[in-house]
Image: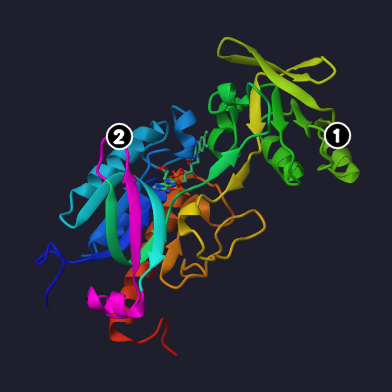
Amino acid sequence: METVASNPDAPYGVAILGGGPAGLSAGLQLVRANRRIAILDSNRPRHSATLQSHGFLTRDGASPLELRRLGREEFEEYPTARFAQSMVREVAPLTRDEALSVGFPDGIGFRVRATGIRGSADVELVARRVLLAAGLTEELPALPMIRAYYGTALHSCVECDGFEKTDKPLALIGETNDLFARALLISRFSSDLIVFTNGAETVRPDQEQQLASIGIRVERRIIDDIVGERADMTGVRLADGEIIPRVGGFVRPRWHAPVEFLGDLEITRDSWGLVVVDERGETSIRGVYAAGDIVPPGPQQLIIAAGNGARVAARLNMDMIRGALGVGQVDE
Ligand SMILES: Cc1cc2nc3c(=O)[nH]c(=O)nc-3n(C[C@H](O)[C@H](O)[C@H](O)COP(=O)(O)OP(=O)(O)OC[C@H]3O[C@@H](n4cnc5c(N)ncnc54)[C@H](O)[C@@H]3O)c2cc1C
């Protein structure tokens, strides 16, 4: 049997869109399954605002960029791996005849076009399957200085950065209706917590009472901005001019799945805009899978994204084996 290792011109098994922990981990599993794999990555991870990442077993405290570098190196050790620094612009399904003619045995395939970045060449390739691992774009509450403190004083992932905030005077800022649950989680780290809703009615009166019973205040006035001295956050300034001293805390962004490259291709999303997948990680588009922060419940942690990427890779591999034999996805 001809394998991808013996035929370097074999078409790609999977095009992975996004080279964060989800995409890199899936890529590693798939090259180790003797698949020819392309990872296309625009190198704009959501966590680029931060210098240290926490909670990744064996790498607690490492820089997230270092994690990506190590992951890319491991992936590129394999002869069937290709990593391209590029921004994916278009994903289009091949017709059944086109897919069969390039050697995709189940008549499913995709053409992917990407623009090279930082001097890299543009990319155009065909692949049997596509894995969306493009993470999320996030929209922070519209406060002029919030970005300056995001990733240092203000974070979004409580599990990732709560420990470092232990016993500090904290703010939780957000406009979504999960603020109550987030406040409960943060109360594990500090009892000096104020929840800022920025004028949104997102914490119910009964929830406010429950929070008050553990010493957490809800501040419903409109926020003007975050204030600080040099790199240090010192407080939250309200629209009426009052400054409430806070040294940091958590913000709840709104998240969007960046899948503009699908163009007119319809893909099912949930009410948050995240890409819905079945239990195998396949989206509503046959042959297109998704893993990592881009799928519900949304942003979690590096190790969870990496684990999810590995899990979906195993399903993708089996889908391609079964597809080549025409034996369906599951045994009856
Ligand atoms: C400020 C901050 C701090 C964090 N700290 C921690 C922490 O301490 N510990 C922890 O476990 N987690 C932390 N996280 C969460 C963690 O970063 C994410 O859960 C994880 O990175 C998700 O991995 P992913 O592979 O799904 O997506 P990402 O890591 O976001 O990677 C997605 C990749 O896809 C690329 N991409 C997007 N669109 C395209 C396109 N069109 N074409 C090509 N490439 C594209 C992006 O450039 C990016 O490189 C933090 C997050 C933030 C925002």
Whole-percent x, y for residue 205 in the image? 90, 42
* Residue at 50% from the left image edge and 65% from the top image edge: 265
Query: What amino acid type should be assigned to the residue bearing mark 2?
Result: Arg
Query: Which one is earlier in the sequence, the residue at label 2 or at label 1?
Result: 2
Whole-percent x, y for residue 297 in the image? 59, 55
Residue receiving disc 1: 212
In the rendered image, is residue 288 in sight?
yes
* Residue sitting at the far top: 229
Which residue occupies the foreground of this view, 207 or 220? 220
Part of the protein shown in magenta? 95-121
Q: Pick the quarter of the image with the N terminus.
A: bottom left
Residue receiving disc 2: 118
Label 2 close to label 1 by CB (< 8 Å): no
Which residue occupies the foreground of this view, 222 or 113? 113
Residue 256 against residue 326 in the figure, above or below: above
Dot 1 lies on which element? helix
